[in-house]
Amino acid sequence: MAAPEVPIDIDPETGIWRTDGLPMIYLPRHFLVNIQKGVEAAIGVEAFRAMLYGASDLSALQWCREEARTHGLSPVDTFRHYLKRLSQRGYGRIEITALDAAAGSAAVTVRHSAYALGYGPGTGRRVCYMLEGSFSGGMRYVLEMAGRAGEPVCREVACAADGHPECRFELRCEPVG
């Protein structure tokens, strides 16, 4: 199967890479995995997980807002497009396996996760938590566009680095307040 095309435009003057008009940085997978391992060692897994969650949630929300304007996509199609782009950028093969946009819930499966592969199958714990905030930010966009109150929450419930055949995430919407 041929790899899907990802449009990359490189400004010859500045060297800035863009996909769909958004500035991008192209990095080797081990760079991101090594950063995660280093920060985990420095501040602990739970502290880093919390920090990543907020940052990746906000980044996903911003990305979805921008992409929806660029492509004129519906909120759910924007969320699907976001996951497709994450897949195309090497985070793994990401698939929505269940989605209830009205309820703000979803199940997402990641096969060949960059983080699980980087840590290895014998790690004995879930390591793909960077994607939790990304998925909640995508769902936050769907809820925002529907005018629905609630806080999307995502948790990794299974990880290939913990011996599972794939990584699985569950999203749900919690009441605010």
Image: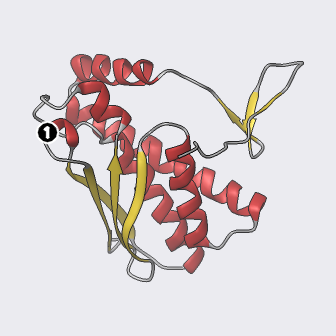
Up the image or down, 96 lies above or below 116; here it is below
Image quarter of the C terminus: bottom left
| Nearer-the-camera pick, 164 or 126 | 164
Q: Residue furthest right?
A: 13
- Is 95 positioned to the left or the right of 153 in the image? right
> In the rendered image, which quarter is residue 120 located in?
top left
| Nearer-the-camera pick, 66 or 162 | 162
Q: What residue do we see at 20% from left, 47% from top?
A: 165
Residue 41 coordinates in the image, percent (x, y): 22, 18
Look at the image and tell me whether residue 59 can be seen: no
| Nearer-the-camera pick, 146 or 25 | 25
Q: Residues within 10 Å of mark 1 (few under 14, many from 20)?
A: some
Q: What residue do we see at 38% from left, 81% from top?
A: 103
Residue 176 coordinates in the image, percent (x, y): 35, 71
Q: What residue do we see at 29% from left, 38% from top?
A: 49
Secondary structure beneath label 1: helix
- Is 165 positioned to the left or the right of 85 in the image? left
- Is 83 positioned to the left or the right of 100 in the image? right
Which residue is the site of mark 1? 162
